[in-house]
Image (cartoon, rainbow, N blue to C red):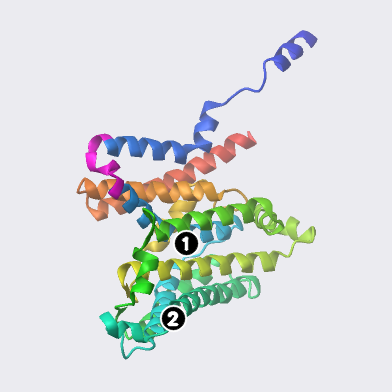
Amino acid sequence: MTIQNRSRGTAGPRIDPVDLVSRHSAPIFLVLLIVAFAVLEPRFLHPLNVLNVFRQVSISGLIAIGMTFVILTAGIDLSVGAIVALAGLVGAYVAKGGLESRFAIGTAADTGNPVILAFLAALAVGAACGVLQGLAITRLRVPPFVVTLGGMTAFRGAALLFSGGGPISGFSPDYGWWGQGRIGSIPVPVIIFVAAAIVAHIVLRHTRFGLHVYAVGGNAQAAEANGIPVRRVTLAAYVIVGAMCGLATFLLSARLNSAEAVAGMGLELDVIAAVVIGGTSLFGGVGTIFGTVVGALLIGVLRNGLVLMNVSSFVQQIVIGLILVAAVAIDQYAAARSKA
């Protein structure tokens, strides 16, 4: 019996290939997707298309970074698309100096307020939406799903009411640079996305607040018993995702040269899918910013490759929905194996 124990001890830890694949399924699938599209569609790896993928991913990716904080606390935010619409319109309103010149272009578009005020307005509106929902969740004890579902409807209605159902378009070149400009050969939104991901990673992994986020998602009651301010941490998570919506919509309106009440329709699917596909558990307490970035890239690559292959947008939605379900199934399977 002693000999058997010694022989087992010298064998070292046994690697479980199934567990290894389940834990790294997103990066593996991303690499396989890139290889497949590169073979099937030669235009896919063209430098201009690669930059286009990153530019498209940067908007939803920024919101996905904020959503990671929320889901890590075992919450959810279904209102991000509506917040994008409302915050974008308010920022555009400030940039144009009112609705009277909402369609002004050229030199007439330079008569509004400085770009920094428009950015701060969009950021403030997004954060305020996060505060409202965070307070409803932490103070009124309403489930996050219900609160943000209501927020999705209310904020979308507020956006339509604010703009009268119409767009605000035609911004100054200084405004448009934030969505269309480049530093070197890299689009500005991509640089901001990468910087935001690095900062979020540092916050989650190397600060007390980050540790509290994981603790709240892992077991809120135990976290509270250990002196962690669960309400404040949860509220902060919703403020973060709201602020990221404000940042993302500022870049989006700058890129499109327009802000609309219908902006962000269906965006919550891509954002939540990116976070969950990237390995963040819907039950909270498990996940990384790196995984979210990989998940966002995976969805961006998938959409771009399917567009290049002339696949219907309806089919794209079906594929992303199936991948989302598969990601949750893999997460559940990995959790069950770890307990066995």
Q: Amino acid at mark 1?
A: Ile
- Residue visible at 67% across and 64% down? 233
**What segment is highlighted magenta in the picture?**
39-48
Q: Which residue is mark 1?
A: 63
Rendered view: 163 above or below 141: below
- Residue situated in front as seen by the camera: 313 or 47: 47
The answer to if 6 sits in the magenta stretch is: no
* Residue 114 image label: 2
- Residue visible at 32% across and 91% down? 100
| Dominant secondary structure of the residues highlighted in magenta in the image | helix
Q: Looking at the rendering, which quadrant does residue 58 occupy?
A: bottom left
Q: Nearer the viewer, mark 1 or mark 2?
A: 2
Locate residue 239, reporting x and y percent: 57, 69
Describe residue 253's horizontal placement relative to residue 3 as left or right.
left
Q: Amino acid at mark 2?
A: Pro
The answer to whether one can see residue 76 in this image is: yes
- Residue situated in front as seen by the camera: 297 or 29: 297
Rendered view: 336 above or below 308: above
